[in-house]
Amino acid sequence: MNDLMTRNNVKVMGQGEQTIIFAHGFGCDQSMWQYIAPKFAENYRVVLFDYIGSGNSDFTAYQSEKYSTLQGYKQDVLDIIEEMDLQNILFIGHSISSMIGMLAAIDRPDYFDKLIMIGPSPCYLNDTDGYRGGFEQNDIKELLTMMEMNFAGWASYMAPLAMDQTKDPKLTYDLENSFVSTNPRVAREFAEVTFYSDYRESLPLLKVPTLIIQCSNDSIVPIEVGQYLNKCIENSTLQIIEAKGHYPHISQPVETTNIIVDYLMK
Amino acid sequence: MEVRLKEAPCGFISFDHSGYINEVNNTFLEWMGYKQENLVGKHIESFLTMTNKLIFHSYFYPNINLHGYVEELFINFTNHTGESIPYLMNAKRFRQDGNEVIDCSLVQMKKRIDYELELRSTKKQMEEAYLEKNRALAKLEQIYLEIEKKQIELMEINSGLVKISNTDKLTGISNRRFFQKKLEEQIVIYRTVEKTFSLLIIDIDHFKKVNDTYGHQIGDIVLAKLANILKIQVRTDDIVARFGGEEFTIILPDTDFEEAILIAQKLNRTIELAEWTETGNLTVSIGLATFSENDTEDSIVKKADQALYVSKEKGRNRATHFRNL
């Protein structure tokens, strides 16, 4: 089934024995890993991919129903693993992909060695039970509206960009335009799935050893969420990076890499 | 900063890789009611609501880092009174002496945003209306399909009913009602295209004895068996029916007097020679009539009946045509 490799735009690099899967977060694609993935490719086999509806994936494979929960995205991950017959996987997921990886590892713990979650959150909304996800309902509504009003921008952002594609701005431009029409609905639905998700109840089911990396001053996920995850996930380690933002692998690639390498060496 | 950039007809902000503001021009400060010291050194996030922070981080930040530019981003900045002011922002990454700065130019879009919101709500309404129309259409199609299905069902039920109403329950061949209809049809054909037809009335000989000796159940079996023989023996267009009791009729379309007699005689023989395990043997008497100019629906039946009577009189197991009386 070569289709699947094309469907999810799967890219493999590096020669190591063990496999690392890098899974991008909301509104991004695999190019977000360009600052850290090459380093890991020196010692590992690195698998990169785009979720359906993101990057250079096959947009025609997008089904609103399937991707109306993270389970649809989780299935994509399991499909790739099974197609490539991967074992002892190290899964690095950013943001919402941490939860997608978690769901996959709950389903098939035998596939995974370790999970690394970068800026994870099991639930973005504040809850009446005292849980603080960081967002109120209104924030999310406003976000969806703003996204709609930034349609063209979102589309261009989701445009497929291989790591060296910036060399060919014309190509990028063409691709940007080609996705303007299809992308907004997908982006909106992904945003809804992401920001309305609540997987707090699944956390105790995760048994695979997990590293939680959080920025000390994360702009999107409050610091308590990292602690909450650390408490609820049985076999987890919490590492705080002195950083602002939500993308330590872009803003502090060296530090992020070191934290991950240290954890993998343990 | 050059005076002309300070006073440019657009806002200008420059911040470092981490998002801390280095420079801001007067135009932006005036628009927002801030002073230099309110902004410089502060993180850009300080002027973004939660939602705008999210847009900034999930869209702007990775985009500027991966592509080096962002164009036409719609984003709100919070002014000194805490009000969200909408802007259209372009940004470009600029590297100088190993340092990276992000320069942003901003244009207010207060009026534009009103138009946009209006457009957006109109678009939403249109989408709703469109969806509603599609839903209504789908519903109509569904209803139409259901009606069509019901209609087919009704037609099936109807044709079933017609068949039942035209069939003799015991023998499974047509009943008297169907016979009458077909007889009328034959008369119409006679009147329009002048094709004559003949009628046979068949009566089982000594049927009362069969019932009395073997019981009604055997009587019924004999009736059904005879019906079956008649059905097999006739030609495709001939119409066999149970007239009532032990009486059967056969309409022979397009058949004259002579041919009818031959057919009737052949029937006599076939029935006589058939294996009647229930009764040992069985014969029938037949009366014939062929339709002619002055005949009616009633008269032809009467004539055949008279001929049948004569067959019985003459000793049964034979066929008599009315013309030979």
Image (cartoon, coloured by chain):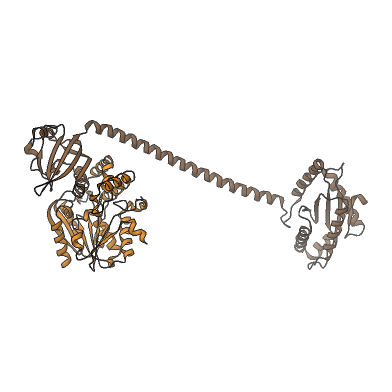
Chain colours: A orange, B brown
Quadrant housing residue A93: bottom left
Q: Going 70% across and 49% down the picture, which residue do you hit? A: B165
Residue B205 visible (yes or no): no
Quadrant housing residue A136: top left
Q: Quadrant of the N terminus of chain B?
A: top left
Left or right: A76 in relation to B167: left
Foreground of the two, B44 or B322:
B44
Q: Position of residue B192 (x, y in %)?
A: 80, 41
Tell me how many marks there are.
Answer: 0
Left or right: A255 in relation to A162: left
Residue furthest out toward the left = B37
Residue A168 visible (yes or no): yes
Q: Is residue B80 above or below residue A248?
A: above
Q: Going 66% across and 49% down the picture, which residue do you hit? A: B161
Foreground of the two, A142 or B73:
B73
Foreground of the two, B111 or A3:
A3
Q: Position of residue B261 (x, y in %)?
A: 87, 55
Q: Position of residue B193 (x, y in %)?
A: 80, 42
Q: Going 89% across and 54% down the picture, which residue do you hit? A: B320
Left or right: B72 in relation to B212: left
Q: Position of residue B129 (x, y in %)?
A: 39, 37
Q: Is residue B184 above or below residue B110?
A: below
